[in-house]
Amino acid sequence: VSELATVLAMGGMAYALRAGGLLAGSRDLALPAQVQRGLRHVPLAVLTALIVSSLSAGPADLLPARLLASGVASLVIWRTRRMWLCIVVGLAAYNLLRLV
Amino acid sequence: MTQRAGLASVAAVDGSGRAQFWRGFAAVVPLWAGTIPIGVAYGVAARGAGLQSAEAQLMSIIVFSAAAQVSAISLLTSSASLPVLLATVLGLNLQLLLVGLAAGRDLRALSVWRRLGLAVVLTDGAYGVSVARGLTSPAGLFGAGSSMFVGWNAGTALGVLAGQAMPDARGLGLDVVVPLTFLAVLVPLVRSRPRLVVVAVAAACMLLLQRVLPVGVAVLVSAGLASLAGARLAGE
């Protein structure tokens, strides 16, 4: 499958979710509470799994550096809530650690 | 509930859609401080992963979801299959369905065509801001969503340009931008114990499963198990 087709398919999926909710919302469609609770956690769970996989994916000898840099970046975003600062500090920490 | 009904009727009385649009647009501008850097990070990562500039930008226009796009980049580099990629987009954007349901309930009077138009720019962030500011009219929500759309695509364009200017991204340690971007989105979401449990379960499952399953499948199975754990915990 070409990259362009992949991008288009992803766009179709994202639009279907947005439009689906807006169209269905006009009717009184109530999902069971248990299902709603489960759905609410899905993005968080997917993000976590992706963090683990993307940290594992880089060069193996630099894994400790990536973990440390991610730890520092997590502290930054937790304390400051500034996304750009989290990325900049994390990237700087990683590059410093790679030099060591 | 009464508050919501009140807001809807205010919007119906106040017919000036254009003013509502720009109020919604302006309300989201402060959020650009978070949106643009993530857009830049995505644009750089997309170029680093070998995506064409036009494809990277197109993705920001039609997918318009930071988490889904950054994950697509990381899954494309590990050559995940299309169904797995789409399932990940679905998993990361289920909240859009819920937001759409909630917004759709507020906008009962809106025609189908206008709903389909509004859907292009609907995000949870824009919905949250417009509800917080009392701008639940269609025009207000459309303005808030459009503002997010502009910030996200401007950030992407900057990132793509930066990615082009840097010939060898690997030398700059940019492989860590993807996990950092995820962390920037994830950490502020972990506000309660059930959510912490979801994160812990997902991480533990992923550490085990990624050794035996293709990455994309491992992501989906881990996320499914962790969501179930979260749902059970919150139900108690």
Image (cartoon, coloured by chain):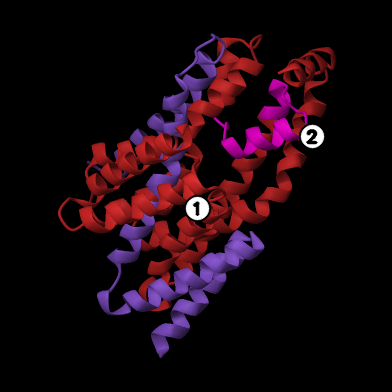
Mark 2 residue type = Arg
Residue sticking out furthest to the left: B212
Lower position in the chain sequence, tag 1 or tag 2: 2
For the question of whether residue B12 can be seen, the reply is yes
Q: Position of residue B89 (x, y in %)?
A: 38, 39
- Looking at the image, residue B204 sits to the left or right of residue B103; the answer is left
Q: Is residue A49 above or below residue A26?
A: below
- Say which colour chain B has: red
Q: Quadrant of residue A98?
A: bottom left
- Residue at numbered disc 1: B186
Q: Do circles 1 and 2 both sit on a common chain?
A: yes
- Looking at the colours in the rendered structure, which chain would you say is drawn in purple? A
Secondary structure of the residue carrying tag 1 is: helix
Q: Residues within 10 Å of mark 1 (few under 14, many from 20)?
A: many
Specify the segment rendered in magenta: B120-141
Q: Is residue B105 above or below residue B218?
A: above
Confirm whether the magenta stretch covers residue A27.
Answer: no
**Do labels 1 and 2 touch, CB within 8 Å?**
no
Q: Which mark is residue B153?
A: none
- Looking at the image, residue B210 sits to the left or right of residue B175; the answer is left
Residue lying at 35% horizontally and 50% vertically, measured from the top left: B201
- Residue at numbered disc 2: B23
Secondary structure of the residue carrying tag 2 is: helix
Give the camera-side residue of A97 and B113: A97
